[in-house]
Image (cartoon, grey):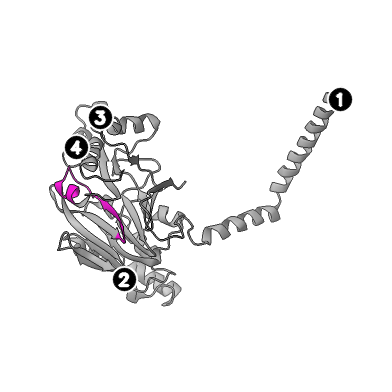
Amino acid sequence: MKNFKIFKFSFIFLFVFFIFLFFLFQSNNFQNSIVKLGIKNLVLPSSIFPEYDALSALVCGSKSPLAHPTRAETCILIKAGDKYFIFDVGDKSVSNLMNWRIPLDKLEYVFISHLHIDHYSDIEDLHMWSWVGMNRGSKLKVYGPDGIKEVLGKIEDASQIDYRYRNEHHGDNFAPLDIAGFDAKIIQEFNVPIYDKDQIKISAFPVNHHPIDPSLGFKIEYKNRSIVISGDTIYSENVLKASKNVDVLFHEAMSKEILNMLYEALPIDSLGRVGIKDIQNYHTEAIDAARLAKKANVQHLILYHLLPAPRNYILENIFVRGLKEEFKNFTLSNDGTIVFLPTNSKEIIIREIK
């Protein structure tokens, strides 16, 4: 009887409590308070990077051009000390950066690896969100291969009406026309620093993504830590040389096994079959990226530009089959995979932003 009374009291209490919550959430004042709290958190500076001195890398886009419901196309944000750099800026990547509250107006440079559109399709969004109402202070600085000035010039020409409308609406302080557009520079020297400042060195090297020529990889060094980004390539001796003893190698990766399943699923007369076969001759299989990382004595391998990006646990397992036998220290990236390399140690910290 005593237990029944306790149960009855508990049931009545919970019932009344949930009724109270139901009506509380219908209150305009309560709803406004919740939203104001959420908005306040949205406008606070990003807290995803550590306060200690580090070389950090954030995957702002992990997929290749093949469709995926949630991932963005290729993009890696580098933070060296207090300086920010972006390497490629594919579709939806800027939305990720904004959701993570990255201060886009503080970008030092954007680096474009090659002129396939999935590597620069969000460049105009990046331009706008680092220009309008921001404190960028100059045109958006972009390094890229031969052809980058032509491409960005066309984008800038197509955006002139937008620039003018925003300036007319918001004024010179909010949307200054003198810094609208791009300051593009062609990368003409390889394996020498194209950026060398504040103990940060960034160099480019050619990779093999034929017929795309040039297609570039990048090496970033900050104090005693180092990162290499392969760009799009088949297995490349230049990536191997640049990656010798680095802390982290970001290497593009494909799964021929999954691609061949996709090929078989398509109708025999489908042009999609032609594309699936063609893309396999200028990308690197995940297991070959692992072998390269082992040979180069890389400390950790992160696979990105995933072709195709896995949609579930089973596909993830297929994508990395055999890798552990070749190289144990690897991560299959997601949008939001982040790496911290503290400058006062050899530690490699890898987390996921949700």
Give the quarter of the figure containing the N terminus: top right
Q: Looking at the image, is mark 4 or mark 1 earlier in the sequence? A: 1
Disc 1 target residue: 2
Of the two numbered discs 4 and 1 in the rendering, the one whose residue sits closer to the viewer: 1
* Horizontal side of residue 167 vs 302, given as left or right: right
Mark 4: amino acid: Gln
The residue drawn where x is 24% and y is 40% is 294
One can see residue 51 in this view: yes
Disc 2 target residue: 139
Q: CB of mark 2 within 8 Å of CB of mark 3?
A: no
Disc 4 target residue: 280
Disc 3 target residue: 257
* Horizontal side of residue 90 vs 134, given as left or right: left
Of the two numbered discs 3 and 1 in the rendering, the one whose residue sits closer to the viewer: 1
* Horizontal side of residue 299 vs 151, given as left or right: right
Q: Looking at the image, is mark 2 or mark 4 earlier in the sequence? A: 2
Cα distance, mark 3 to mark 1? 64 Å
Q: Which range is magenta? A: 222-241
Q: Name the residue at the right extreme.
A: 1
Q: Is residue 240 magenta?
A: yes
Nearer-the-camera pick, 293 or 4: 293
Question: What secondary structure is found at the residue carrying circle 2?
Answer: loop
Cα distance, mark 2 to mark 3? 44 Å
Q: Looking at the image, is mark 2 or mark 3 earlier in the sequence? A: 2
Percent x, y of residue 113: 23, 55
Q: CB of mark 3 within 8 Å of CB of mark 1?
A: no
The residue drawn where x is 22% and y is 51% is 116
> For residue 173, what is the image quadrant?
bottom left
Q: Looking at the image, is mark 3 or mark 1 earlier in the sequence? A: 1
Percent x, y of residue 95: 41, 54
Cα distance, mark 1 to mark 2? 76 Å
